[in-house]
Image: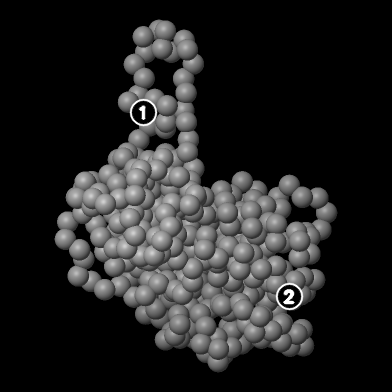
Amino acid sequence: MPDSQQQPPHSPSGQTDTAALLLCGARLTDGRTVDVRLGGGRIEAVGTAGSLATGTAGSLATGTAGSLATGAAGALAAKVDLTGYLLLPAPAEAHAHSDTALTADGHGPLAYDDRAVRRRATEAALLQLGHGATALRSHVRVGDVQGLDALTAVLEVRRSLRGLADLATVAMPRVLTGTAGADGLAMLRDALKMGASVVGGCPDADPDPTGYVEAVLELASEHGCPVDLHTDASDPARLARLTAMAGGLRPGVTLGPCGGLGGLPPEVAARAADQLAAAGVTVVCLPQGACGSADRRGTAPVRLLRAAGVRVAAGSGALRDVSNPVGRGDPLEAAYLLASRYGLRPEEAYDAVSRAARAALGLPEVRVEAGFPAELLAVRGDGLAGALSLAYSRIVIHRGRVVARTSAVREYCDSAAESGLELPRQGREEPS
């Protein structure tokens, strides 16, 4: 296949693997089987299977996540055999809560000390990375009991994950208006100075939601940073004010989970969708469950929003905390639910957790084409519908390097073979 002529934007600065890596025999969603050569954190070439194999440094076990190759760009490429795998742009986690993740089984008050938050945030990020999310946006509470301690811990985790995954943080104060709001506003300013990259919060929880949004938008405009607000969106008048205020802000505004839209009369929900589209707002829905800062009212009406032209992404939301004690933090599960429960085609559903999610995070687009960032996910399976249904074995590539591998083995008892039962073609791994 000829190299793509489109030049994508540069990927964010950071550590990349300059050694070359060759992905052999991968299947694409259009049915083609290709080789893909990576180098310098980007896709260097895509060709028909076997066309790029000359001059490689040798084969590695499928999905080996160790030191794959050494040397400068242009060195001989190590090979990863992706026969039987579907190669996709890597998903991104557009809505996480690292500071409260993995606390559902805890007893007593939630611990916000540095060590506890660092442990939880690290474990959650690695869990999500193993599922394929090479970029994450985490909402972190600031003010009240935790002050800036939780944010400090998550920023430390961000630094420790460099080279494995990109972690962005959203500072979330509880109140920004009235006498109590002065402290919250000061805390929010300090959070941005510390390294929080997005201004967020939950205006529905403030006595003056409009004043809360005004404060957030003013601070975001002052610092030139994005906005990511929690709202249930069940009050159409309040949502209309919010979208009117947010329209035109650059960088843009993200709202989520907006589950209350699904409970509005159809004509009211349609009018709200038109307003969101006109304002250029991105909606991040949470098909796996809501989070503690918004009422659990189901999932936003994604088909209605998409039909109106709203940019819709999907995230995981709560991860095994009091809001969702069984969360998986798996973008493919979010896509599966969008397809199975909310009527999106598999391609649309995966787009919500990959291209649309990356766009919501301000990241460059990824395609399996030359010149694009080497942010990739290989899942065992022949097609996207099958991968969303049953994708246990995964190989995750971040900045041109294999950073995580999950290998699933399925075995059948001896009596199955003795009875003459014909086992699946890949009987020792999950069916594709």
Q: Which residue is mark 1?
A: 426
Q: Quadrant of residue 113?
A: bottom right
Q: Residue 235 in the image: x percent, y percent?
A: 54, 72
The residue under label 1 is which amino acid type? Gln
283 is higher (above) or lower (below) than 29: below
Q: Which residue is mark 2?
A: 148
Q: Say whether disc 1 or disc 2 marks the residue closer to the N-terminus.
A: 2
Q: Residue 268 in the image: x percent, y percent?
A: 43, 70
Of the 4 image quadrants, the one containing the C terminus is top left
Q: Residue sitting at 49 percent across and 63 percent down?
A: 135
* 17 lies left or right of 136: left
Q: Residue sitting at 70 percent across and 50 percent down?
A: 104
Q: Secondary structure at mark 1?
A: loop
28 is higher (above) or lower (below) than 155: above
Is 175 or 367 nearer to us in this picture? 367
The residue under label 2 is which amino acid type? Leu
